[in-house]
């Protein structure tokens, strides 16, 4: 059944082709029974009879599990079926832009990066609690829709692969640079593998570059399994030390040393977001290089999102980006701003305690956090305000003179 000539799948009438995926074609279709427009993701079944039966069994098992996920940050699956050699999933049609496309436009503003990662962690936590593991978290499987909401796509499809690494041909199925060490090594992957993959995405969002890059597959796999990544702050100086620690814990090579739940990761990301919000609420002093970096004036436009689902804006103005992947109307939701009163000190203390490692890399990052976040914010506010700075300097000078007179 040729994809170009396909006009019907089960009860669904094909309206247009939205794009090609690793395992099949994505279509826009009409459901005449419920009078709604959906996205149809197709999967070509294996020609081998025995492999096909096992593949189909796993497909329906995974689709059933994924179909039970009802969460604001997870795409909704409406139906599954089979038409000839094609198995398919009918899911909500999302109108937005893939995170992959957002990242192509340039560096993502740090608060937006943290917000997106926290939402993805929320969706993963919900799925993991119900025994569903994604196994292919990457920017192309995350859609940003209305109100800056992140939606995880392709639940129930990633596990359809016979293995993450097909040893017979040596071909990697999926996106190798987002795979966990256990996936690359061909070991069983659980929910902590999703946490590692999200850590890779977060690193790339924050630093503007992936943590693992190599000219060939063998070197890339070696880096993922054996080589420590550079702290993202060494690539992008505006990344706070707290985020270095969060990413270091998410990217631990041993799954037992990583975050053990995506909910825990989401909580630390929101604590870091509060830290960044406090930092950015301090007016930058004229000529302050660090402040200019934080503001995104580093020579490349800093990408942020407009409220419109298919637009991006940067410091140069508004740019329109066409929707990609599975797009569609979403459920309306209220996006509440983060309270500036959120205290991240306790989360930071817990994080530094959890992320101490024997090689001293993370310990060095933790040591750089002194003074405490709250004290640092207060000092920044005192020093960056010209009036307070003058007053503080006068008080210090008077105290020094008084001490000198007392000892003379």
Image (cartoon, rainbow, N blue to C red):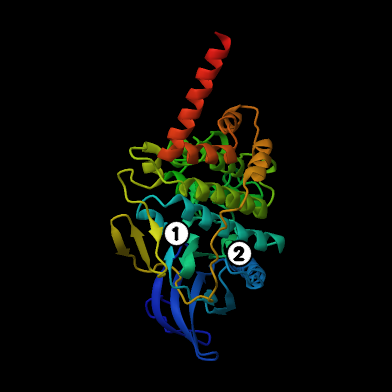
Give coordinates of residue 408: x percent, y percent: 54, 8
- Where residue 18 sits, quadrant-wise, is bottom left
Left or right: residue 377 compared with residue 262: left
- Residue 265 — which label? none
Give coordinates of residue 368: x percent, y percent: 55, 30
Residue 288 seen in this snapshot: yes
Q: Residue at x 64, y 37 (%)?
A: 352
Q: Which of labels 1 and 2 is toward the front?
A: 1
The local secondary structure at tag 1 comes to helix
For label 1, count other residues whose C-alpha is less than 10 Å away and answer few (under 14), some (14-19) or many (20+).
many
Residue assigned mark 2? 51
The local secondary structure at tag 2 comes to helix
Give coordinates of residue 60: x percent, y percent: 64, 72
The image shows residue 406, relative to residue 54, as above or below, that is: above
Given residues 153 and 233, the one toward you in this image is 233
- Where residue 120 sits, quadrant-wise, is bottom right
- Residue 99 — which label? 1
**Distance CA(mark 1)–CA(mark 2):** 34 Å
Q: Residue at x 43, y 78 (%)?
A: 28
Given residues 172 and 325, the one toward you in this image is 325
Residue 214 seen in this snapshot: no
Give coordinates of residue 207: x percent, y percent: 44, 43
Picture mark count: 2
For label 2, count other residues whose C-alpha is less than 10 Å away and answer few (under 14), some (14-19) or many (20+).
few
Given residues 259 and 334, the one toward you in this image is 334
Q: Earlier in the sequence, mark 1 or mark 2?
A: 2
The image shows residue 309, relative to residue 339, as above or below, that is: below
Position of the N terminus by quadrant: bottom left
């Amino acid at each position: 059944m040729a994809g170009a000539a396909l006009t019907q799948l089960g009860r669904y009438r094909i309206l247009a082709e939205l794009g090609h995926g690793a395992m099949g074609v994505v279509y826009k279709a009409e459901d005449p029974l419920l009078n709604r427009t959906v996205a149809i993701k197709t999967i070509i079944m294996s020609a081998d009879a025995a492999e096909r039966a096992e593949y189909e069994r796993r497909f329906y098992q995974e689709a059933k599990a994924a179909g039970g996920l009802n969460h604001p940050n997870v795409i909704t699956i409406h139906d599954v079926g089979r038409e000839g050699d094609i198995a398919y999933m009918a899911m909500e049609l999302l109108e937005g832009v893939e995170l992959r496309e957002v990242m192509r436009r340039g560096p993502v503003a740090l608060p937006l990066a943290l917000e997106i990662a926290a939402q993805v962690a929320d969706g993963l936590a919900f799925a993991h609690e119900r025994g569903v593991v994604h196994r292919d978290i990457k920017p192309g499987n995350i859609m940003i829709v209305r109100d800056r909401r992140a939606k995880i796509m392709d639940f129930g499809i990633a596990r359809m692969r016979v293995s993450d690494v097909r040893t017979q041909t040596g071909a990697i199925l999926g996106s190798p640079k987002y795979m966990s060490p256990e996936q690359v090594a061909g070991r069983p992957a659980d929910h902590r593998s999703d946490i590692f993959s999200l850590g890779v995405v977060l690193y790339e969002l924050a630093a503007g570059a992936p943590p693992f890059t190599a000219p060939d597959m063998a070197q890339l796999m070696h880096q993922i399994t054996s080589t420590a990544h550079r702290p993202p702050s060494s690539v992008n100086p505006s990344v706070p030390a707290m985020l270095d620690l969060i990413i270091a814990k998410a990217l631990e090579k041993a799954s037992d040393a990583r975050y053990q739940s995506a909910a825990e990761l989401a909580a630390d990301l929101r604590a870091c977001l509060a830290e960044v919000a406090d930092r950015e609420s301090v007016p930058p002093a004229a000529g302050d290089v660090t402040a200019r970096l934080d503001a995104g004036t580093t020579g490349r436009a800093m990408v942020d999102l407009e409220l419109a689902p298919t637009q991006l804006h940067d410091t140069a103005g508004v740019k329109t980006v066409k929707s990609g992947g599975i797009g569609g109307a979403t459920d309306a939701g209220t996006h509440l701003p983060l309270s500036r009163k959120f205290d991240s000190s306790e989360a930071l203390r817990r994080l530094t305690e959890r992320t101490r490692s024997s090689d001293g890399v993370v310990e060095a990052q933790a040591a750089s956090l002194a003074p405490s976040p709250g004290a640092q914010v207060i000092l920044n506010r005192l020093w960056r305000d010209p009036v307070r700075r003058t007053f503080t300097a006068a008080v210090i000078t008077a105290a020094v003179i008084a001490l000198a007179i007392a000892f003379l």
